[in-house]
Image: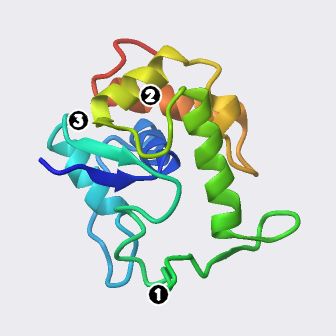
Amino acid sequence: MDPIDLRPHHLIDVVTDFGFDEEPEYEPAPGENGVRALVRLLGRGLDHPARFVVGPDFVCGPCSHLRPDRRCDRILEHHDPPQAMDDYNDPLDRRILAALDLAAGAVMPIREFLEMLDERMPGFESVCTHPGQTQATRREGIINGLCTLGVRRES
C-alpha cells in the first residue's frame, strides 16, 4: 500500500468529527476537498500508511481552492486578523508534529499516529485547538473519536 500524504491536523479534525457524529454522511460534492474520502479510508481500517506533511495533502488534492502553485486560496475571515489558510495550517501542522516528536515526511500506519495522539490525551488539545473552539470541546471530540475508531478503550 502506498502512503497517502496527510496533514496531521486534517486527521485530528476528522477524528474529532467522529467523536461528535458516529454515522456521518460522506458524499463529496464536485470540487470539495477530500475529507469525505479520508473518512471512507478510515472506515476501512486504520492500517493504511500515511506520510505526515506540512503542505497540500490527500484532503487538499481534489479541492477547488488548491491553486496551481499548490497554495490554498482560502482566507480565514473569522480569524482576528484574517489570514491565509496556509499561513494558519502550516505552523499548526509543524506544532503538532513537534509535539509528537515527528519530522515532516514521517511515514507510519494511521493507527500508529492515532496511538501517539491517544498517549498524549488529555493535554494534546492545547496544541491543536482552533480559534473559536474551546480546549474542552476539542479534547472531548478527540477522545470520543479515538474511542469510536477503537484506538482508545474508554473516554
Mark 2 vs mark 1: which is more N-terminal?
1
Q: Which of marks 3 and 1 is in front?
A: 1
Q: Which of marks 2 and 3 is in front?
A: 3
Q: Are marks 2 and 1 in contact (CB under 8 Å)?
A: no
Q: In the drawing, what numbered circle is on residue 144? A: 2
Q: Residues within 10 Å of mark 3 (few under 14, many from 20)?
A: some
Q: Which of 7 and 25 is in front in this view?
A: 7
Q: What element carries label 1?
A: loop
Q: Is mark 2 on a helix, strand or loop?
A: helix
Q: Do the residues labelled 2 and 3 touch (CB within 8 Å)?
A: no
Residue 116's image quarter?
Answer: top left
Tag 1: residue type? Answer: Pro
Q: What element carries label 3?
A: loop
How many labels sit on residues? 3
Residue 59, image x, y percentages = 38, 63
Residue 26, image x, y percentages = 29, 61
Q: Nearer the viewer, residue 105 or 100?
A: 105
Mark 2 vs mark 3: which is more N-terminal?
3
Q: Nearer the viewer, mark 2 or mark 1?
A: 1
Residue 78, image x, y percentages = 77, 67
Q: Mark 1 points at which residue?
A: 68
Q: Mark 3 points at which residue?
A: 46
Q: Alpha carbon of mark 2 to alpha carbon of mark 1: how far?
A: 37 Å
Q: Residue at x 55, y 19 (%)?
A: 121
Tag 3: residue type? Answer: Leu
Q: Is residue 19 left or right of residue 135?
A: left
